[in-house]
Each structure stands twice: as structure tokens, then as C-alpha cells.
Image (spheres, helix red, strand yellow):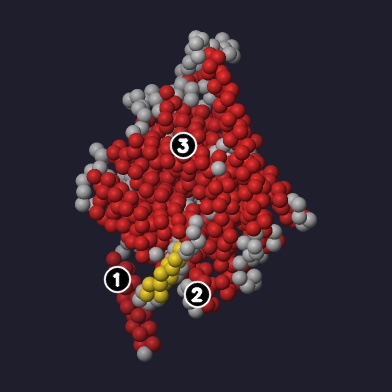
Amino acid sequence: MDYFLLGCLLFVIGGLVAIFFKGNVKGISFLLFEVAAQFLILPTAFNALIGGIGTEKLISFSEPIGTAAFRLDALSAFFVIIISVGSLLAAVYSIGYLKHYDEKKYSFSSFYFFFGVLAASMLLVVVVQNAILFLIVWELMSVSSFFLVGFENEKEEVRKAGIYYLISMQIGASFLIAAFAWLSSLTGSYDFNTYKNILGTQGTVSIILFLLFFIGFGTKAGFVPFHTWLPRAHPAAPSGVSAIMSGVMIKTGIYGILRIILLSGIPEKGLAFSVFIIALITAIIGILNAISQKDIKKLLAYSSIENIGIIGMGIGLGMLGLAYNIPIIVLFGFFGALLHTLNHFLFKSILFYGAGIVYQKTGTRNMEKLGGLIKYLPITSIIFLAAVMAISGLPLLNGFISEFAIYLGMANSLSYNNASLNILMIIGFSGLALVGAMALIGFTKLFGVTFLGTQREKFEYQPKEANALFLIPMIFNLVFVFIIGLFPATIIQIISGVINQFTQTNSTTEFNAILTVYYSLSKGLLLFIAIFLFFFLIRYFLLRKREIKNFKTWNCGYQLESSRLQYTGSSYSLPFLELVAAFVPQKTTVETGKEIFPVEVKLKTSQHDFVERIFIQPMLKYVRSFLNLFAWVQSGRMQQYILYGLIFLVLILIWIIGVR
């Protein structure tokens, strides 16, 4: 554990050391410390994950913290690996990305300092087992990411996004503070292990506590209706920060929920049903809003909400398995949730990295202004396409494997004679299939409109393929996207220690059955690849000496390429969005000249988050109305403010005299 804590410290030291260098050397010096930290953190984490060798260290702090336990078990190790590797890849990417800002007055020193604090605080969040210290590092994680979101702080929309994000995090933290304070008052301790006595009772108190924790951690993860910060913060942040926030940081919320489930033991059936339903709603609302977006990073942010919903469905499924004592459902549910957590980190990081390249090479994130980028960014385009296929859940790639596990868990649930469980699983099965279909619509729109066809507007300068600093993190993640997609049984065995933490009984038979399913699936996928390669080689040898001319099969009078004849992103998704207009309200504005036959017509469409319009905005309206009742307090008169100070001093004196 000492090596692990030293590794966390190296992240912070790297950020501090970077302050004393200039220009691009800051990023290189920071990266060297990050690489050194991997050699201290990853061996300890893999020992806990694969070898089952957990570790613990007790450190004494002054009151009120007292003795704090740092525990690294299989669950913590799983998240530590994602956080550590994800931070390293984002650091490599950021060196190349920040070159774009060399000539502008941005503080690279603060960027790398807060980057180091963010990475260290995320690592500590998943190992600290003391309530007060946990809340401290949780807050450090929120504050450091707030400063990273506000990197381009001269832009008003960035400042607003940062403040909105920070307020959202404080609201979530308030629920965590309430839950930890209540638990600590009941147990007389801040150590997580003592909370089992309360959380495992299955009484009213434990249910309320679980809900408080779920709201607190769910706000960080992005569950509906606490998701509205994501589509604001991700577009505002630099792409490397967006990748680490979406691919890594929001998973600390998932970790928190899983940790509370471990401490709670067998959950109430009502809680399990609620988590599953909330997760399904989150997935549907997330992808509905993603389809309607024109901003690439905003689309990806809403897609993160969708994927958090899928992870939540796996968690809810595992909780249902525990509640009904069905081991096979427990294994499929938690395996699907954990693997999709890893998978989402892999392909969503690629997509945010790719979005950053597009933005830097073209100067825009609006896909309606893009098109034809595959001609200029061929490597980026191919990697991006693979990630799009993975996030859409297509076979041969990792997204399919984790979603398939959740499908199998729901299918197995139907074999048990329980009406309410069966109805829920039918709804879940249909809902997840709908989410998959909508994801395919959203991501074919994203890739097709951005990379295919003809460019819609002239670029200031012709885009060129990104350099190695951009591409290395993407290629690294892509390798594991394919490995997990083709050899899923291997990853099951690697994370089996985490899954076994959630089972209440010996589940060897069920676990072997899952391995058998995935071994068979792997053989089928490899056979498909072999058949494809066989026919490809036959075609190659038959045509290798023949001249092949390109013909447009369905020409239909089409003679000249023109962006005016192409689908826009809005027109591509419009038929579907019209079907769900009540949930994704669209505002259309047409601007024309005053002439009878106007030369130019502009059509603008904008979207509104249904949940924000129904819940958030009315709440803000009431809060403003309430605060306006006290507007008289801030009158602007100095005499009144001095009077406030005198009244405060008098009250303090009265309180001191009363205490004595």
C-alpha cells in the first residue's frame, strides 16, 4: 500500500514540478512523473485484482478524522487500473492538444497542477475507507475538475458551464454528507466496515440511507435527473479533460454505488426494481438527447449518460439477483456492469480524443459545418469508426460483449416464475434493444455527417492527419476494444475476483456456465473473421491482375458532388425525432430576406433537455423567487452593512455569556 500511496503523490508532485518549466516541457515533465507512478500503482492493483492479494494501511490523522483505513480490494483495484491508465493516456494526448494554445495566454501550469490533483484524488476516492477523509478527497476531485473545465475561462459559456458543474457537484456532495453523518452518528465510527451493521438491516433507515447515497453518487455518475451538468461541462473542457471526466471520473460515482451495495449485503427488492428502472430511463433519455445534437462533444456527453444507464441496468440486474437469490443473474448483472464500465472508458475516450482532433483541425465542433474529413484524417477516421461501432454494440467489438451479458441476465430471469420480475425483464429487454437501435442512429449520424461525403464549408486551412501524441492513446484503447470483443472469457477470468465479492453463495457452476457461453461466442466470432478473410483473399487473387474501374451503381442523374445534395445531421435524424418530439422538444427558426424570392434562407434548429425543462428550470425559478424575498438585505448602503456587523458581534457576546 505504501507504493500505491507514493504513486498517488507522484501525480501531485508532477503537477507541481511542471510549474517551473516553460511551454511544452511542462507536459513532458508531468508525463515522466505519471509514467513513474504507473510502476508503483499498477503492480499493487493487479495483485489485488488477479491475485486476490488485497492490502490495507492505517494512518492516524488529527481529529475529527482519527484513524483512516486505506484498503485496496478487488473492486478498488479494478477502478484504480482504469483511473491510472486513463490519466496517463489523457496526459499524453494533452501534450499534443495544448500546443494549439501556445500563442494564447492560457495557464498550462494550473492545467497540469489540477490534472495531477484530479488523478490523485480519483485514486484515493476508491481506496479511502474513512467517511471524513473520503468526503475531503471527493471534494478535491470536484474542485480540481472544475478548474480543468474552466481552462478556456475567457469564454462566457465556459465560465457558466464550470459554475453549473461545480454547483451540481456540491448538491450531490450534500447528499453524501447527510448519509455519512447519519451513519456515523448511528455507529459511532467513520470506518466503512462498521456501516454494514446499519446498511445490512433491510429496514426503513437503511433504505433511506441507500437512496441518499444513490443520489449523491448518481449525480457524479450522471443518472437522470441529475445528469444536466454533463452536456455543459464536456463541451467546455479541453478534449483530454473531457475524455478523463467521461471515461474515468464519472465512474467514481459507479464505484460509490457498488461499494454501498457491498456494505448493504442483500438489497430490498423495491430498491433493486427502482435502480433498474431509473437506469433504463437514464439510458433512453441520454440517447434520445444525443441523437438531436449538432455539437460533437455534446452528443458524446449525452451518450455517456446513456452508457451510465446501461451500467446501471447491470447493477440493478445484479441487485435483483441478490434479492431473489438467483446466482446466475447476480453474475451476469454485475459482470455486465463492470465490463461496460471498462468498455465505456475504452471507446468513449477514443471518441473524445477524436472529437478534439476534429476541433483542432477544423476549428468547429458543429457537424453541420463538417464533412469529408476521412480524406484528410484517414487514420483518425478509421479509429473513430471502430469506436463508433463499439459504442453501438456491434459484434467483434467490446461494447457488444458487456451488453450481451446484460441481455443474457434478463433472458435467464424469465425462466423464474415471478410475474413482477418477468414483466420488468421484458420491459428492460425491449428498452435496451430500443437504446441500441437509437445509438446506431445517433452514431451513424455522427460519423457519416462528420467524416463522409463532401465538406459543407471551406476550412481556413486544409486539415492534416494528427501526430503521434494524439493517435497513440487512441490506438492503445482500440487494441483492447478488439481484444475484449474477440476474447471475452479472458476478461471474465481477470475480473472474476470483483464479481465474486457480490455473490452471497458459491457460484462456481454458474460462473463456469458463463465462461462456456463466452468461449463459444469467441469461437463464433473468430470463425466469422476467418470466413471473411477467406473470401477476401479469393477476391484479391482473382482480381489482382485486372483493372477495376469505379462505377456509381445508382447514379440517377447524379453527376456532380455537392454538399447541398447531402443529408445534414438534422435532416438525417429528423424522421426519428418527430416520433419522440414530446421528449426531445425542438425549436425551428427560419430566417429569410425581405425579397419576394429571397436569395438565401437560413434554417436553425435547437433542442431542449426534457428533464431540465420539466424539473430543473421550475426549481430554479422557485429558488430565485425565494431569494428575491431577501433582496433587501443587499441594499448597497455602507451604514446597513456596518449594522449587520454590530448585530453579529452582539449575538456572539450573548452566546459566549450564555455558554459560561
Given residues 169 and 407, the one toward you in this image is: 407
User: Mark 2 belongs to which amino acid?
Assistant: Ser
Which residue is under mark 3? 296
Q: Residue at x 36, y 32 (%)?
A: 466
Q: Residue at x 52, y 56 (%)?
A: 254
For label 3, the SS is helix
Q: Is residue 652 above or below residue 134?
A: below
Return the x and y of residue 60 as percentages of the image width and height: 37, 75
User: Mark 1 belongs to which amino acid?
Assistant: Ile
Given residues 641 and 318, the one toward you in this image is: 318
Q: Is residue 222 visible?
A: yes
Which residue is under mark 1? 642
Residue 184, which numbered label? 2
Q: Is residue 651 above or below residue 433?
A: below
Separation of residues labelled 2 and 1 (CA atoms): 40 Å
User: Mark 3 belongs to which amino acid?
Assistant: Ile
CB contact under 8 Å: marks 3 and 2? no
Residue 8, which numbered label? none
Return the x and y of residue 238 as percentages of the image width and height: 37, 43
For label 1, the SS is helix
Q: Earlier in the sequence, mark 2 or mark 1?
A: 2
Q: Residues within 10 Å of mark 3 (few under 14, many from 20)?
A: many
Q: Earlier in the sequence, mark 3 or mark 2?
A: 2
